[in-house]
Image (tube, helix red, strand yellow):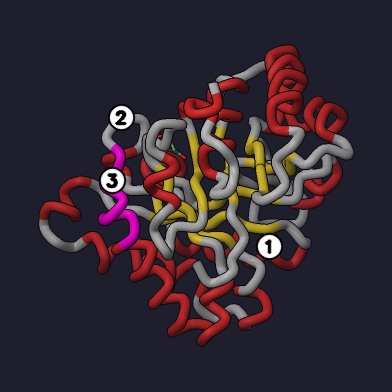
Amino acid sequence: MANRRTVIAGNWKMFKTTGEATDYAVRFLEEVKEVTDLDIILCAPFTALYTLKNELEESIVHLGAQNMAWADQGAYTGEISAQMLLDVACTYVILGHSERREMFGETDEEIAKKVRQALATGLTPIVCCGENLNLREEGKAVERVQGQVTRALEGLSTEELSKIIVAYEPIWAIGTGKTASSKDAQEMCASIRATLKVLMGLAAEKVPILYGGSVKAENIAELMTEPDVDGALVGGASLDPLSFAKLILNAVPSSVSVEEGI
Ligand code: PGA
C-alpha cells in the first residue's frame, strides 16, 4: 500500500437512540483504546451526535454523519447543515450512500454539491459509489462507478480532492451477507484510483479508498491485503461494539487477530 491511511468507518444507519449510543461508546472505547494505526470513525444518526460528542471527546474515535444539506442555512425543512455537524464535533460525513440515492432519489448533481459544501466547511466527505446487480451482470459496473466518482468530484482542485475519502459499496453486497470477493473489491478500487488519477494526477495515490458491503470481523483481514483497499465502511457489523472492535483489531496489519489472541 502506498503509505495511505487505513480507515474503518461504522455506519449505524437508522439505528440507536441516545441511551444506546452512550452505552455503545463506553463499551467500544474500552475495546479500541490501544489502537493507534488506523482512523476509526462512527457515523451515527443526527440525534445521537451530540451525545457521542461528549462520550468520544479526547478519544481516538472520530465522529461522522450520514448525510447533510448542500446549503449553508435557510428554509430547508428537515435538513441538517454542515455547520450543525461541525457544532457537534463531526469531522466526517458520508455522502451519496446508495440508500440515499435509491430510496430518497439523491442525484449525482446533489451529491456533487454536498461534496463541495463539506469541503468548503472543513468536513471530510466519505463519497460513496457502487453498482447494482444488473449492472454487474451486464458488465457495466466499472463504467457506472467511474461515472459516479467523476460526476461527484470533477472540477475540484487537487488540494480539495486530497481531503476526500471514497467508499466503494456494491449495492448487491450491502446488508445481504454477500461480500464482494477481495479480488472484485481490489479491481474496482483500482479503477476508482485510475479515475482519481485522471482528476488529480499522482496525488490520487494518497486518497483512502474503502470497501463496503457485508464486511465483518471474519473477512476484513483478507480485504485489507489488497493494495487498493485502504479500509472499510461497515454497516451491520458496526452495530455491536464488541464485534466492531474485533473487526477493527483484525484490520490492523500488525495486531494479533482477536481470534488468534484468545
Ligand atoms: P453492510 O452495510 O455492512 O450492512 O452491508 C454497509 C453500508 O451500507 O455502508
- Residue type for callout 1: Gln
In the picture of the structure, the residue carrying the numbered disc 1 is 117
- Residue type for callout 3: Ala
In the picture of the structure, the residue carrying the numbered disc 3 is 180
The answer to whether mark 1 is within 8 Å of ligand 1 is no
Residue at 23 percent of width and 60 percent of height: 141
Asked if 161 appears above or below 109 in the picture, the reply is: below
Give the mark nearest the N terminus, 1 or 3: 1
Q: How many marks?
A: 3
Give the mark nearest the N terminus, 2 or 1: 1
Residue at 59 percent of width and 55 percent of height: 6
Q: Position of residue 189 (x, y in %)?
A: 38, 63
Secondary structure of the residue carrying tag 3 is loop
Whole-number angstrom distance, CA of label 1 to CA of label 3: 31 Å
Q: Which mark is residue 245?
A: none
Pointer 2 local density, CA inside 10 Å: few below 14, some 14–19, many at least 20: few
Q: Is residue 182 magenta?
A: yes
Asked if 52 appears above or below 72 in the picture, the reply is: above
The part of the chain drawn in magenta is: 179-186
Residue at 56 percent of width and 20 percent of height: 240
In the picture of the structure, the residue carrying the numbered disc 2 is 177
Q: Are marks 2 and 3 in contact (CB under 8 Å)?
A: no
Asked if 150 appears above or below 246 in the picture, the reply is: below
Question: Position of 150 compared to 252: left or right?
Answer: left
Whole-number angstrom distance, CA of label 2 to CA of label 1: 34 Å
